Image: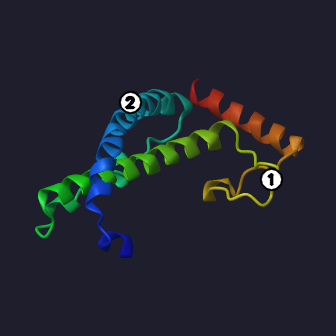
């Protein structure tokens, strides 16, 4: 919290355009990922990820924040929530298409990968892949 107290006004003013301009690529990313999510997940039989669990906008209601702080909090809530939401969509996609662990053992991996198939285990992969295909084919009959 110390960095919040050392508020350098000049640095903040200089950084505003850089922070602000990022909204455009994030909005574009949001549109494309949401289109993929809403179209492809039903085709794959993957449950839709609940957007409202990730994008939470409530800090603007706090009376002790001024308008600038409320805008900043809303911006951060959107960006951080969006990234968590997209990460969950990517995780569900990875689980569906390629649930194989990576070969590097000392890397930091997301929690959802802990039950993935071990790297190089073609027997288990082929067995699981055939099961997934059979399940998918049965769903669409």
Image point 13% across, 56% down: which residue? 67
Please give left or right for residue 46 compared with residue 71 in the image: right
Please give left or right for residue 47 compared with residue 137 in the image: left
Q: Give the SS element for disc 1.
A: loop
- Observer-nearest of 44 and 104: 104
Residue beneath label 2, please?
Answer: 28
Outermost residue toward the left? 63
Q: Is residue 107 above or below residue 120?
A: below
Outermost residue toward the front? 10
Residue 135 at what x, y percent from top left?
Answer: 66, 35
Image point 80% across, 58% down: which residue? 105
The numbered mark, 2 or 1, whose residue comes first in the sequence reads 2
Find residue 115 and name its label: none
Color theme of the render: rainbow
**Residue 101 is at least partly visible in this image:** yes
Outermost residue toward the top? 141
Mark 1 nearby-residue class (10 Å; few <14, some 14–19, many ≥20): few
Please give left or right for residue 31 compared with residue 102 in the image: left
Residue 7 at what x, y percent from top left?
Answer: 29, 67
Q: Is residue 133 above or below residue 114?
A: above
- Observer-nearest of 103 and 45: 103
Image point 57% across, 25% down: which residue? 140
Find residue 104 and name its label: 1
CA distance separating discs 2 and 1: 33 Å
Mark 2 nearby-residue class (10 Å; few <14, some 14–19, many ≥20): few
Q: Give the SS element for disc 2.
A: helix
Please give left or right for residue 87 compared with residue 131 in the image: left
Q: Is residue 9 above or below residue 2?
A: above
The N terminus - image quarter? bottom left
The C terminus - image quarter? top right
Image point 63% across, 31% down: which residue? 136
Residue 43 at what x, y percent from top left?
Answer: 52, 27
């Amino acid at each position: 919290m110390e960095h919040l107290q050392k508020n350098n006004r000049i640095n903040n003013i200089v950084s505003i355009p850089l922070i602000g301009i990022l909204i455009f690529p994030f909005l574009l990313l949001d549109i494309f990922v949401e289109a993929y999510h809403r179209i492809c997940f039903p085709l794959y039989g993957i449950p839709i990820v609940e957007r409202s669990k990730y994008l939470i906008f409530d800090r603007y209601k706090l009376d002790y924040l001024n308008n600038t702080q409320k805008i900043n909090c809303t911006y951060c809530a959107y960006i951080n929530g969006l990234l968590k939401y997209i990460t969950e969509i990517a995780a569900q996609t990875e689980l569906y298409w390629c649930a194989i662990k990576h070969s590097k053992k000392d890397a930091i991996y997301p929690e959802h990968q802990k039950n993935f198939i071990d790297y190089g285990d073609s027997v288990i992969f082929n067995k699981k892949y055939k099961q997934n295909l059979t399940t998918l084919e049965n769903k669409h009959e």
